[in-house]
Structures are given as structure tokens and as C-alpha cells.
Image (tube, rainbow, N blue to C red):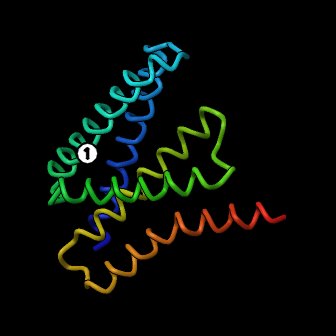
Amino acid sequence: MGMRAGPAAVVSGVVGVAWWLASRLAWAAVGCGDWGCLPYTLGLQLVLALATLAGAAALLNSLEIRPGGRTALVAASVLVALWVAAKALPWWPPYRVAGLLATCGSFAAAGAVGAFVTDARVHPWWRFLLLAAVLAVPAAGFMVQAGNAWT
């Protein structure tokens, strides 16, 4: 089981670094702070996200981590959960290097979860428990935020 999670984490971490760099370059290339540029910028971000997902699936398949597409989709779902939790918590790193490391770590963790959940040898209860824990991450983030609002 761990034989899939390690390589998937490395591939996903590398894909995360590539996405982060491409995303930063895309924002810089648009170079507009006006609301009129927002649709173009968001469209470009969507294209980058889809290309990243397709690239991750192809890389995972080439490393015999199959099904790569399903693994990449689960990893993307985990990334959405982590993103929601990060929006709820005020501690997301403001510096570029810290942001790059956090992105790489988030992508690597999501890739490992995706590989574990899509492994046919994993008992369904372990899949359920891991996915329940992933779904609890955003809820925990919002609970922490709500607790901070009352102090």
C-alpha cells in the first residue's frame, strides 16, 4: 500500500511546484489589477488547473500508479478541502518561499491520499476513515475560525 503513496506524493509535490510557478507567472503576465481583467485571469487559472490535473494523471500512469486519472481526481478533491481550510484559517504563509513549500506539501499530501484511497488492496473502511478525515479538515478550520471570532 505504501508503495503507491510515496511516488504519488513525490509526483504530486513536483506538479504542485510547477502549478505554483505557472500560476504566479500567469498572474504576472496578466498584470492588471482592475476588475475587468478578472474573467481572463480566472479563465487562465482554470486552464492551468485542468492542465495540471491532466499532467498529474499522465505522470502517475507512467509510474505505474494506476488509475492515474482517478488518483489525480481524488488528490484534486483533497486539495479543494485543504484550500477551504486554508481560507478559514489566518495562518496561510504570506511569503513566496513559504507559499511554495506549503503548496508543495499540500500537493504531496493530496497525492499520497489519492494513491492510498484508489489502491484496490486497501480495505474499504480505511478509505472511508481517510476520506472522512479529509472532509473534517475544512470543518475543523471553520470551527477554529469561529472560536477565534468569539475571543
Residue 113: which quarter of the image?
A: bottom left
Q: Position of residue 7 (x, y in %)?
A: 31, 56
Decide if residue 126 is on the left or right side of residue 51. right
Q: Quadrant of residue 123?
A: bottom left
Residue in the image at 51% along x and 13% along y? 32
- Residue 136 lies, in percent from the top left, at 50, 72
Estimate how packed mark 1 is, as few (under 14), some (14 to 19) or many (20 or more) residues with alpha carbons within 10 Å. many
Q: Find the residue positioned furthest to the front.
A: 36
Whole-percent x, y for residue 117 in the image: 28, 70
User: Is residue 61 toward the left or the right of residue 139 in the image?
Assistant: left
SS for tag 1? helix
Residue 118 in the image: state x and y as whole percent.
23, 68
Q: Which residue is mark 1?
A: 56
Horizontal relation, residue 28 to residue 129: left or right: right
Indicate whether 99 appears above or below 111: above
| Residue at (31% x, 78% y) in the render | 127
Please tell me which residue lies in front, 147 or 86. 147
